[in-house]
């Protein structure tokens, strides 16, 4: 499943309401005894996400990964685009949104 932070209406997992622009934090917590793999395509120098050459983080059981999706100025950090790789363990995903409305 891709977790796009920028608009992509062709992706069924795309969040149509917020378009990812106010996501503050994403947390992944493995729920089983398998390793989970989170891939970061913008850090993979053109390699396909979840491929062995791609930049990825392996989550071990009883661990967690926190991804801060905003820059200190409140703008989206597009470098945090990430994907939980299929078949890589059961993982609880928690997303924290910044619901502040700016005029």
Image (spheres, helix red, strand yellow):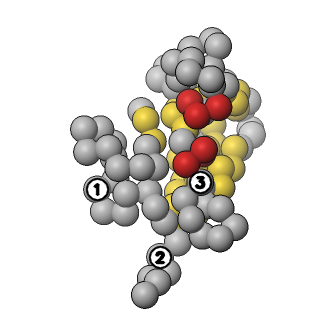
Say few, some or many: other residues with alpha carbon within 10 Å of mark 3 (under 14 / 14 to 19 / 20 or more): some
Q: Is residue 22 above or below residue 54?
A: below
CA separation in Å, label 2 and label 1: 15 Å
Label 2 sits on residue: 99
CA separation in Å, label 2 and label 3: 17 Å
Q: Secondary structure at mark 1?
A: loop
Q: Nearer the viewer, residue 8 or 26?
A: 8
Residue at the spot 37% in from the left edge and 57% down from the top edge: 19
| Residue 60 seen anywhere in this rendered image of the structure | yes
Q: Is residue 37 above or below residue 69?
A: above
Residue at the spot 29% in from the left edge and 38% down from the top edge: 11
CA separation in Å, label 3 and label 1: 19 Å
The quarter of the displayed image where residue 25 is located: bottom right
Quadrant position of the N terminus in the picture: top left
Say few, some or many: other residues with alpha carbon within 10 Å of mark 1 (under 14 / 14 to 19 / 20 or more): few
Q: Secondary structure at mark 2?
A: loop
Tag nearer the camera, 2 or 3: 3
- Tell me, yes or no, whether the two marked residues, 2 and 3, touch with CB atoms within 8 Å: no
Label 3 sits on residue: 77
The quarter of the displayed image where residue 3 is located: top left
Label 1 sits on residue: 16
Q: Position of residue 80 (x, y in %)?
A: 60, 45
Sequence-first tag of 2 and 1: 1
The quarter of the displayed image where residue 42 is located: top right
Tag nearer the camera, 3 or 1: 3
Sequence-first tag of 2 and 3: 3
Say few, some or many: other residues with alpha carbon within 10 Å of mark 2 (under 14 / 14 to 19 / 20 or more): few
Q: Position of residue 93 (x, y in %)?
A: 53, 47
Quadrant position of the C terminus in the picture: bottom left
Q: Position of residue 34 (x, y in %)?
A: 64, 23
């Amino acid at each position: 499943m891709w977790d796009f932070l920028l608009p992509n209406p062709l992706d069924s997992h795309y969040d149509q309401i917020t378009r990812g622009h106010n996501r503050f934090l994403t947390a992944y917590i493995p729920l089983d005894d398998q390793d989970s793999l989170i891939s970061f395509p913008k850090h993979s120098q053109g390699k396909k996400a979840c491929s062995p050459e791609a930049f990825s983080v392996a989550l071990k059981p009883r661990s967690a990964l926190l991804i801060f999706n905003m820059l200190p100025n409140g703008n989206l950090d597009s470098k945090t685009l990430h994907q939980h790789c299929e078949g890589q363990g059961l993982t609880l995903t928690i997303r924290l949104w910044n619901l502040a409305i700016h005029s």
